[in-house]
Each structure stands twice: as structure tokens, then as C-alpha cells.
Amino acid sequence: MHFYESVRVAMLALAANKLRSGLTMLGIIIGVGAVIALLSIGRGVERFFVEQFTSLGTNLLYIFPGQLSGGPPQERGRDVGVLTLNDSYAIANPLRVPDVIAVSPEVTGRVVVARGSSDLEVSVSGVTATYQDALLGEAAIGSFVGETDVQERGRVVVLGSDVFGSLFDPNEDPLEQTIRVNNILFRVIGVMEERGAGIGGANLDETIFVPLTTASDRLFRRRTVSGDYIVNVIYATVSSEERMEAAQEQIAELLRERHNIDFQGEDDFSIINQSDLLSIFGDILGLFTLFLSAIAFISLLVGGIGIMNIMLVSVTERTREIGLRKAVGAKRRNVLGQFLIEAVTLALIGGILGIILGGGGALAATSFINNFSAVVGIDAIVIALLFSTAVGLFFGIYPAYRASRLNPIDALRYE
Amino acid sequence: MFKPSPGGTGANGSEPQVDKYPVIETIGLTKTYTMGDVEVHALQGVDMTVHVGEMLAIMGPSGSGKSTLMNIIGCLDVPSSGLYRLDGIDVAMLDDNALADIRSLKVGYVFQNFNLLPRTTAQANVELPLLYAGIGGRERRQRAEEVLKTVRLDHRGGHKPNELSGGQQQRVAIARALINRPQLILADEPTGNLDTRNSVGIMELFQQLNEEQGITIIFVTHNPEVADYCDRVVRVRDGLIESDERNSPVGGEAPPFQAMPSVATGQ
Ligand SMILES: Nc1ncnc2c1ncn2[C@@H]1O[C@H](COP(=O)(O)OP(=O)(O)O)[C@@H](O)[C@H]1O
Ligand SMILES: [Mg+2]
């Protein structure tokens, strides 16, 4: 008997019991669907972050205060795990750190902005003039925070495009207008182009940018005891990708010296590059994938047991049919093949429906989110199909074997 | 009422005697079923020889072992002991696949309760044995149409069993038995579920197949009128052959098996 004949016979048998076939598939559909959906969203998140990181250039270093690895807080040194504006200026000194070409410190927080009757809570970034080149795009209107603004602690603000949209009419000229930031008057000097989410998922369009000094003094009132400006992060642009390690060493040496850490002491800062970030992220994603695999395994197991159960019922129900087929010349392998194909077809159709449902669902659900979309990977689809087939084979083999071993006359006499 | 055609041996009588060789030989065939502690001796040593072209009826009371014997002859079951040679081959030597080939190619089986696949058209039911004989779709269709014509159901191919009368269903089953051009047809009470009118039609069909195509046919029946169509009647009781008689032909020569040595004396 040809293979496609067996498939036809199997399809007819499944079609004869549509409701039952459908219900049996449900386990596989839900299992595969859930896994594909979560996997696609996970893949989307991964792509999103990779895009965000790499869009900033692969030669960017992130310097954070404290130990990111979660080590014990340092007892020695001055303020524990603090980075300052002067640290940033020191790193910018080409004599000390020759491989770094631009340094951009940042202090961040949440503020309320208001103009007229409208107000909203947004993120604020206190930055210096270098921030735009290192991390941002062009200003759509006006200009970005300049060096003199930082020197003079000017009450000037650059708006993200969404913030502009919330406070102004689209045709309105925002330049030289005043808005209130935490009830302090600021002069608008620019509006950024639409940019989407930035590092760590913060939406740059819903952020306002002010001089770092202004942010520290007027918005957060954060300074060290010695009067230095505290920053949350320093971005350092390295001359080239090859010089990343060298730059990292130069910065570490400089900061250890500035923070008075002796040769035995641990760093009170962390220098992280793109690949570090991506690998931290990869670790999280790996955990997520492992978790998913466990769910997938359990749900496929459950689905497979459902298939086995139904196939056993089906074999019992169709004992006479099996007897008849054997009486007219069906060999064991024909019967085995027929029931195996039925089981695999059940699992495979379930798998395909699961892929369509899960993948389509993930794409549909994320289509409402700006700049983000689930990614339904070919590899995920192929793996899902392979696994469905394997489940069908594995859980179909026993019922099919039972069917194939039936003695024709016993089967025909079965009541 | 049944009206057997004169001369049950019909075409056989005109054929050369050299063609007459045993298609079925059983020697000391026994079959014991074990149900829990109870042993049922369904066959207790059956010696029987059937020659090519014979039309034979097996009769006997219910439970005497007729079906058991037929099932063994049809290779649907295996004997507990004894020898069974089909076409000269000792069936005990054959493996599962070879037995399936015999069921597929050599024997056509007709059951009392038709045993058609429900929800499947007559055409597809008839084609079923060809599926397992590895014959392609076009030839299957062609041959199914042919045999449906032979059983006079040419226009019923698309009907499902529940859309056909009992007689028509049994014709479909006969067409299915015929489709692989078997040399042997086994019919276990083929008219048992049919009324008289349909029974006559079915028996005439069998007679025609026997006479025109020379197919060896063995019936199991309770009905003496079915037996009247046959040229030989074997009576079974308690798993043993009680009698083996030639039906008196109406103006024909002696059936050929009379001229052959019986298995018992031939051994
Ligand atoms: N599969 C079986 N298991 C147990 N006993 C059986 C089985 N098949 C037949 N028998 C017994 O064997 C005897 C002969 O049965 P069977 O050949 O069907 O008789 P018949 O066809 O002449 O009515 C009966 O007593 C029956 O109960
Ligand atoms: Mg019987």
C-alpha cells in the first residue's frame, strides 16, 4: 500500500470523528501555541534589545556606580559606589584615558511637567552636550543642551517628541516658551525627533532633557558632601572596537585612583560593554527559554498522552474494521502504518494549528506596541513541527502496535 | 423458492479431467479453544479434500465447527494441530505476511453479516483488497467497476452500505471477494441474513461464478436449498465430518472428486 493511500485512509478516519479529533488535538494546539507565542515574544524582546544596544554603536562603554555583580558594598573609599561629574570630566581627559573620545554623564529621575492646564509625569535626563552625539538623534526643532547651559545651570529643557505632543499643539512653535518642571519654570530650547525606546526600555520620546547641573541642583538636589554632582551612569565612546579593553583598563585605573581604592580593594564601579550587556541579557533569555522548554515538554507530554488515549479507544472501537482489513489482505505493517499515521496526523495538525494560533496571536498582540513586534522564527516553527511529529510517533506506536497484532478472526468476532 | 439449475457441475463436466487437482487438503485438523479452564474442541480431526472448480456446501448443526473450519481454510485462523495444504503449500510454514498475501490474492471471503466498512462507498469497499495488494488508483477503480457489474450493482458504486438493501450489501461483499480474482471463494452462511428472493439471486450469482469462471466455492449453510446448488455436501457434527456426499446431478456425469482417491486412502 502506498504511503499517500495510508495518509488518505488516516485522514478519512479522523474526518469521520471530527469533534473527537479536534478535542484530541486541543492539547497539542494549546501546548505548541503557548510555546510559539512566548518564544516569538521572547525573540521579539531579544531583537528589540539587541537593536537598541547596537544602535548606540558597538564601541560604547557603560560605567555604573557600585558592583553590578551584586558583591558586598565597599567599606573603604569615600562615598560608597558613587560616580560624579568630575569622574566623568577626568575620563574625558585624553592624557589619562587616550582611547576614549567622548564622555557623557547622565542623571535620571521622574518629574512632573506642566504647561497651561496640561501636566504629565515624564522621565528626565540630566545630561551634558556630548549626550546628543553619543546617544541621541537630531533635534527636530531648535537645538540640544549646550556646554554653556551646563556651566550656567541654565533652566532650559529639550522635549522628547511625545512630551511636545502632550504639551503643545502640533503647529505651535515651542521655542522660547516656558513650561514648568516640578513647578520650576524652564525655557524650551528644542524638541527631539521621534526616537522610540532607548537603553533599558525607557522611552526617549517621553523624556525631557535638561543640563545635568540643573537637574542635580534644581530638581533632585543631589550632590556629594564635597559638593560634586552625582551621576547615575557615564557613557564613554571608545575610539574603536579593538580598543575597548584598553579603554576599560584605563578607566578602571583612573577611577580606582580617584576613589582611593588600594590594590586589594574591589572596584566600586562597573564598566560594562555591549557584549557584556548582551550576554547578561542572553543569560536572562536563556533562563526564559529553559522555562519555556519545560512548559513545552509538559504540555506536549499531556497532549501526547491524550493522543495515546484516543488512539487506544479508536483501536478498540475499530477492532472489527481492523479484522476486516486483515481478512482482505492487510499486513501487520499496513495496520501499524495506518494507526501511526493517524496519530502523527493528529499531532501534526495540532502542531500546525498551534503555530498559526500562537504565532498569529503573538504578532497580533504586539502589533499595538510601537517599535516592538514578536518574531516568529522559522527555527521555532520547524522545531514545533518536529516535536509534534515525534509526539505523534512516540504516543501512537503502542496503540498502533496493539492494532497490528490483532488476530483477524478474533478481531472480526469482537463485539 | 430456490430453483437450482440442472446439472450442478455444469461447466466442470465439460472441462478436461487433468485440471482437477486438490486446492484444499486437510489431514487430522483440530482446533481447541481455551476459555479459562474450559477447553472447547471445535474441530477434532477433519480430513477433507476439495478440488479446483468444486462448489461445495458444509452443513451441520450450530456449534459443530463449520465456521472454525472455514476460518482455517481461509487462513484467518490457524489450526491447533493437523495439516492444511492450500494449493499444495503447507500453510503452517507460512509467516504472517505470506498468510496476508494468501488472504489478499488467493481467497475471497464472504461473511454472513457482510462486514462492509460503514460510511464508506460500495466502490471503496470493493477496492479495499486491491489497496493491500498494492494496486494503483486507476486500476482499482476500473476493476471495482468491473466486478460491481459482475454482481449487477453497476449503478450503486457511490452508495454507502446503509443506503443498500441486505441483498445488495452482500453483492458488494461478493464483489470485494472477487476483485483480486481468487481461485477460491469461502462463504460462511452468505444468505443467512437474507430473505428468500435475495438468497436466490445470491446463489445464482455464485453458481454463475463457479460455472463461468471456474472458481472453487465453499459454502457454510443451514439451508438445504442452498445446498441444492452445490455438487457436494459435507456434513459436520461435533468437530468431525459425519458424511461427505455428492449431490445427484441432473443428467450429468459423476463429479470429478469421486474419481480421485480420498485423502485418507491416498496417504
Ligand atoms: N474464539 C472462540 N473462542 C472460544 N470458543 C469458540 C471460539 N470460536 C468458536 N468457539 C466454539 O467452537 C465451537 C464451534 O464454533 P463454530 O465453528 O463457530 O460453529 P458453527 O459455525 O458450526 O456454528 C462452538 O462451541 C463455539 O462456541
Ligand atoms: Mg458459524
Image (cartoon, coloured by chain):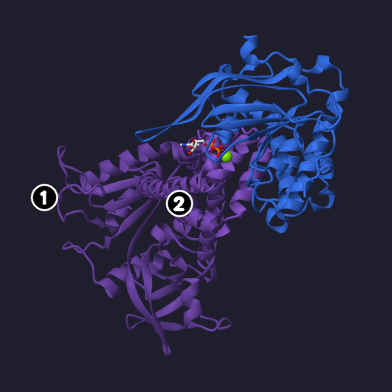
Chain colours: A purple, B blue
Is A56 left or right of A69, judged from the image as shown? Answer: right
Q: Residues within 10 Å of mark 1 (few under 14, many from 20)?
A: few
Same chain letter for marks 1 and 2: yes
Looking at the rendered structure, the secondary structure element under dot 1 is loop
Q: Chain of mark 1?
A: A
Single out the residue that lies furthest toward the right: B14
Labels 1 and 2 touching (C-beta < 8 A): no
Residue A99 visible from this viewpoint: yes
**What residue is rendered at 60% in x and 49% in y?**
A13
Q: Is residue A25 left or right of residue A125?
A: right
Q: Is residue B228 above or below residue B262?
A: below
Which residue is at a point 84% across and 23% down the rendered structure image? B253
**Where does residue A270 sit, x and y in percent of width and height?**
28, 48
Q: Can you tell me whether the CB of the residue at mark 2 lies under 8 Å from the nearest atom of ligand 1? A: no
Q: Position of residue A326 (x, y in %)?
A: 60, 35
Q: Residue furthest left?
A: A75
Identify which residue is drawn at 71% across, 47% down.
B170
Q: CA distance from mark 1 to mark 2?
A: 37 Å
So how many labels did they put on this image?
Answer: 2
Question: Pointer 2 indicates a residue of which chain?
Answer: A
Q: Nearer the viewer, mark 1 or mark 2?
A: 2
Q: Specify the quadrant that holds the N terminus of chain A.
A: top right
Question: Which residue was labeled with disc 1?
Answer: A75
Q: Nearer the viewer, residue B265 or A278?
A: B265
Instruction: Tell me if B181 is positioned left or right of A230 in this view.
Output: right
Label number found at residue B115: none
Say which residue label 2 marks: A46
| Residue A126 x/y as whole percent | 35, 66
Q: Nearer the viewer, residue B97 or A130?
A: B97
Q: Quadrant of residue A186?
A: bottom left
Q: Nearer the viewer, residue B194 or A52?
A: B194
